[in-house]
Amino acid sequence: MKVDSIVNGIVLDHIKAGNSMRIYKYLDLEHLKCCVAVIRNVKSKKLGRKDVVKIDSIIDIDLDVLGYIDPNITVNIIRDGVVVEKKHLELPKKLINVITCKNPRCITSTEQEIDQVFNLTDRENCVYRCAYCETKSDKEDFFL
C-alpha cells in the first residue's frame, strides 16, 4: 500500500491500534475538504501494532480530545515536507465539553448552557470527576 507523503499537514502517529476511527469521529475529520488517510494496524517496533492518521492540511486539533482518547499519540506538524513540530500528548488535567455528566441531578443536566467540566482525579486509572457534582466518569463511558 502506498500513501503519499504530506507537504503541509498533520500526522497523528503512535495511535493505539483500533483507535483511529474514534479520532476520525471525535475530531469531525469527515467534514474536512482536504485528504485524510486513516491507516490501521501498521507494524510498530514500539507498540507492536498502531494506527496512523494523516491530514493533508494544517488545521486546529483539539489536543484534549486526542490526549483523552490516547495519551501516547504523537502529533507531527509538517511544513514544506519537513516535521517542524512534534507534540507528545498526555491525559489532560481538565476536560471541557468532551464528556458529559451522567448524573441527571447535576446542574449541567438542567442548565444546558453550562460547560461540561471534568477534572482528572486518578491519572493511573483515567478517572475524571464532574467539577459540579463530583460524579465519576470512566473512559469506557466516553467510548460507548
Image (cartoon, rainbow, N blue to C red):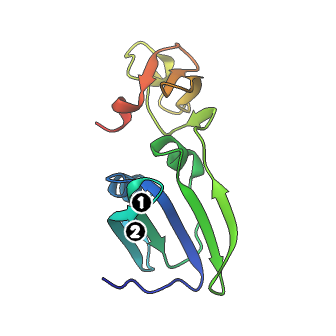
How many neighbours does mark 2 have within 10 angstroms: few (below 14), some (14-19), or many (20 or more)?
few
Q: Secondary structure at mark 1?
A: loop
**Residue type at numbered disc 1:** Asp
Q: Which of 28/139 is in front? A: 139
Compare residues 26 and 17 and report the one nearer the observer.
17
Quarter residue 76 falls in: bottom right
Mark 2 touching mark 1, by CB under 8 A? yes
Residue 121 seen in the figure: yes
Tell me if I can see residue 61 in this picture.
Answer: no
Residue picked out by circle 1:
28
Q: Position of residue 133 (x, y in %)?
A: 52, 13
Q: Residue furthest right?
A: 84
Three-letter amino acid code of the residue under disc 2: His
Image side of residue 99 versus residue 76, left or right? left
Find residue 37 and report its image quarter. Answer: bottom left
Q: Quadrant of the N terminus?
A: bottom left
Closer to the camera in the image, 37 or 96: 37
Assign the C terminus to one quadrant of the image: top left
4 lies above or below 49:
below
Q: Secondary structure at mark 2?
A: helix
- Which of the 4 quarters of the picture holds residue 52? bottom left
Distance from the alpha carbon under mark 2 to that under mark 1: 6 Å
User: With 92 as the anchor, is 140 left or right in this view?
Assistant: left
Q: Residue at x 53, y 44 (%)?
A: 71
At x 40%, y 68%, the residue is: 31
Which residue is pictured at 53% across the width and 53% down the height?
73
Could you say where residue 35 lies in the image, as x and y percent from the top left?
Answer: 42, 80
Q: Is 141 left, or right, of 69 in this rendering? A: left
- Tell me the residue that label 2 is attached to: 31
Q: Residues within 10 Å of mark 1 (few under 14, many from 20)?
A: few
Residue reaching furthest to the front: 45
